[in-house]
């Protein structure tokens, strides 16, 4: 009997082996060119995905944002990995705290979301230099996004650090990463270097294996698809609402006659540039375009969640810096609030697949902390005593003022001292990636009649604040004003504070050098003998300056770059809020709070100021209400303290009034400025 059972057992083993060989692996994500679809574990599959920038969302908010995306009906998230966020200096890597990409990816898996990964090395994302590190430009003649050996060596070094963290999380290895994008919209770049794409393909395959699905994304322009695609990388496209969906996917079919239709970046809104109107795309238009694509069986990834800064810039006939807030008019607001657009998308998704059971998580709580004065008002103007209003002196969050001219604290901001050079050096030449640099020289002669201080075209990158004998003279601006008129004496000190407003993140100009790229001249005579101070403002503020230092006041006027600081305490809660810099005026207006639900007051005239704001050492970005459209800065509750003071530091770049005020609101403001006749409740 035992011998009779052996053949039967052998047959079963052989049958099982044949079944295993005929079936796909237990976990697989593949292209099906016959049925024009993806196959997940052998079953036809299409994803509906949303983009999220973990690097722009504070870590305490990751779960909230991802859960809202999941409850919207999305089956996947598309995740950008900014190289410069993790390798700030060559060979120096940071994957801690908010930069812990592994923890973020593990959280997506915990919440049941698949991941489409965009590791670059170039990602665009309206991020500083498209995610490429500025230190690449330390080699001035480097050709980015090409087969330049210096660039490829840096890329390979980075990928050998990043991709081993990714490989265990691939779907085939038990993780949730179903596909990986190689480069991004490469067809829009001038190089059209197939050797570069082939090198990336080989590197990704060597480090991730042969099973992972690798793909590219380009616009629907055929020339860009020609330069941005390569055999071995599945070609997808991107386009926004209002496009002819059939024609757009026809462009994909030009390069991929078979396989799934994929829109890898469906634009649910658009970015804002300083000085232009706030972008807006209607919910109905977004929903109609999505439904049309889903009816065709396409897989779609949408821009869903806006986020905090590392803003880049575009170049469209001129330099166009992106605003601090990456609001994007997206379905989820910067603070994570669901919008009408999100629910319209959710309704469309429900027509094609079941939605998760349960309600959409609510908006995060906000608090209008109200007015905070950097200098107390000595008395209430007439009419201030109405029952619904309170003067700043009555608020528990009033601030005392500490003030210092930036030029008075160069020893703090540049502890290593200045660099001497016959002519100006770029940020990259002195290895300064971001922020500010002071260029200092002296007038070579007496200038009794106004002389022209000028710079060659396109040589001020990006804004230069000019001081003579520490008196503010005006501003030089890239693609804008390039000359000022000055008078002075031989030996007078000339300072120019240069600001990097964001490196270009898209197109052919990503080699975006910063600082003074050419020499300044006085009536066409070049100035020389410069002292160059690279400023470490972020670092010293994160270390507690100036709150931990002795007050350092200045008797000079309030024009030109200066720091203003103070502290305030929250009323027992640390909720998200938005800070507004109301119009500044010599009139000391009564300022107040009216309950928790809204804020209103007679406000001073439109502001003419701009600068940067830190709270508790966290850089909240640039404010520039005069240029707009952004009027408020988002303050995540996670950066605020409860039960102890919150430190505010303001770097005002052009000029401040005697009574600077901040207004904390429970909502953002865009596309407008506050004026005397306006309340802050809109």
Image (cartoon, grey):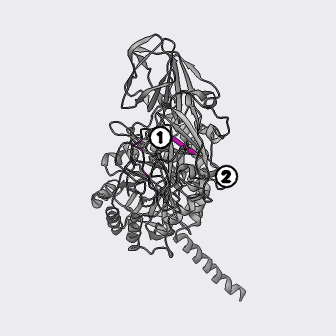
Task: From this view, report whether residue 482 is shown above or below residue 101.
Answer: above
Q: Is residue 637 magenta?
A: no
Between 411 and 68, the one lying in front of the other is: 411
Label 1 sits on a secondary structure element that is: helix
Left or right, residue 452 beside residue 535: left
Q: Pick whichever, 239 or 411, lies toward us.
A: 411
Looking at the image, which residue is at 31% across and 45% down?
A: 223
Q: Which residues are magenta?
A: 600-614
Does the rendering let one see residue 682? Answer: yes
Circle 1 or circle 2, nearest the eye:
2
The 10 Å Cα crowd at callout 1, few under 14, some 14 to 19, many 20 or more, is: many
Q: Quadrant location of the C terminus?
A: bottom left
Q: Position of residue 46 (x, y in %)?
A: 43, 67
Vertical comparison of 594 with 360: above or below: above
Relative to 141, say whether 604 is above or below. Answer: below
Give the residue displayed 50% in from the left and 57% down from the top.
Answer: 335
Q: Is residue 645 left or right of residue 373?
A: right
Q: Kindly identify the residue that appears in the image at 59 percent across and 23 percent down.
A: 418
Magenta residue check for 606: yes
- The residue indicated by pointer 2 is 644
Q: Residue furthest front?
A: 382
């Amino acid at each position: 009997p035992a011998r009779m059972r052996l053949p039967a057992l052998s047959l079963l083993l052989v049958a099982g082996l044949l079944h295993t060989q005929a079936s796909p692996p237990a976990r697989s994500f593949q292209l099906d060119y016959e049925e024009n679809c993806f196959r997940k574990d052998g079953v036809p599959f299409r994803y509906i995905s949303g983009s999220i920038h973990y690097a722009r969302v504070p870590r305490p908010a990751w779960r909230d944002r991802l859960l809202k995306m999941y409850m919207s009906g999305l089956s996947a998230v598309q995740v950008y990995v900014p190289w410069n966020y993790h390798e700030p200096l060559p060979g120096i890597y940071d994957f801690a705290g908010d930069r812990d990409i592994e923890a973020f990816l593990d959280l997506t898996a915990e919440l049941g979301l698949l991941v489409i990964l965009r590791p670059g090395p170039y990602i665009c994302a309206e991020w500083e230099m498209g995610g490429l590190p500025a230190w690449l430009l330390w080699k001035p003649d480097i050709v980015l996004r090409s087969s330049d050996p210096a660039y490829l060596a840096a890329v390979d070094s980075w990928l050998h650090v990043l991709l081993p963290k990714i490989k265990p999380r691939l779907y085939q290895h038990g993780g949730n990463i179903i596909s990986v994008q190689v480069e991004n919209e490469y067809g829009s770049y001038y190089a059209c270097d197939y050797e570069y794409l082939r090198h990336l393909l080989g590197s990704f395959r060597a480090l991730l294996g042969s099973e992972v699905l690798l793909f590219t994304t380009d616009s629907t322009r055929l020339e860009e698809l020609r330069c941005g695609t390569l055999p071995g990388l599945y070609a997808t496209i991107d386009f926004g609402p209002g496009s002819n969906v059939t024609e757009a996917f026809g462009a994909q079919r030009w390069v991929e006659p078979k396989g799934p239709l994929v829109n890898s970046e469906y634009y649910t809104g658009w970015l804002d540039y300083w000085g232009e109107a706030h972008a807006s795309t209607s919910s109905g238009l977004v929903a109609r375009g999505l439904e049309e694509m889903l009816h065709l069986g396409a897989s779609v990834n949408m821009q869903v969640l806006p986020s905090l800064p590392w803003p880049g810039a575009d170049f469209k006939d001129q330099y166009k810096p992106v605003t601090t807030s990456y609001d994007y008019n997206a379905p989820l607001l910067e603070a994570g609030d669901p919008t009408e657009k999100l629910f319209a998308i959710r309704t469309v998704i429900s027509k094609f697949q079941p939605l998760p059971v349960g309600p959409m998580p609510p908006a995060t709580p906000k608090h209008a902390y109200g007015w905070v004065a950097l200098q107390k008002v000595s008395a209430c103007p007439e009419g201030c005593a109405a029952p619904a209003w309170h003067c700043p002196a009555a608020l528990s969050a009033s601030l005392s003022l500490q003030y210092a001219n930036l030029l008075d604290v160069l020893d703090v901001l540049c502890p290593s001292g200045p660099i001497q050079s016959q002519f100006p050096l770029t940020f990259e030449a002195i290895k300064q990636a971001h922020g500010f640099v002071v260029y200092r020289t002296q007038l070579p002669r007496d200038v009794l009649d106004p002389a022209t201080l000028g710079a060659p075209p396109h040589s001020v990158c990006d804004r230069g604040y000019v001081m003579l004998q520490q008196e503010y003279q005006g501003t030089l601006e890239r693609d804008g004003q390039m000359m000022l008129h000055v008078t002075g004496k031989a030996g007078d000190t000339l300072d120019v504070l240069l600001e990097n407003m964001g490196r270009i993140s898209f197109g052919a100009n990503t080699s975006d050098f910063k600082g003074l790229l050419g020499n300044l001249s006085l009536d066409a005579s070049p100035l020389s003998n410069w002292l160059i101070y690279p400023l470490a403002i972020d670092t010293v503020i994160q270390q507690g300056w100036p709150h931990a230092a002795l007050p350092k006041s200045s008797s000079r006027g309030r024009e030109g770059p200066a720091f203003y600081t103070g502290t305030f305490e929250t009323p027992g809660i640390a909720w998200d809020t938005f800070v507004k810099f109301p119009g500044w005026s010599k009139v000391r207006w009564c300022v107040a709070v009216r309950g928790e639900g809204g804020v209103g007051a007679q406000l001073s005239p439109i502001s003419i100021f701009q600068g940067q704001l830190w709270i508790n050492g966290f850089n909240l970005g640039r404010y520039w209400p005069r240029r707009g459209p952004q009027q408020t800065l988002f303050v995540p509750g996670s950066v605020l303290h409860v039960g102890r003071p919150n430190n505010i530091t303001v770097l005002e770049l052009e000029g401040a009034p005697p009574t600077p005020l901040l207004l904390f609101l429970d909502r953002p403001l865009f596309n407008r400025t506050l004026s005397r006749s306006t309340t802050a409740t809109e």
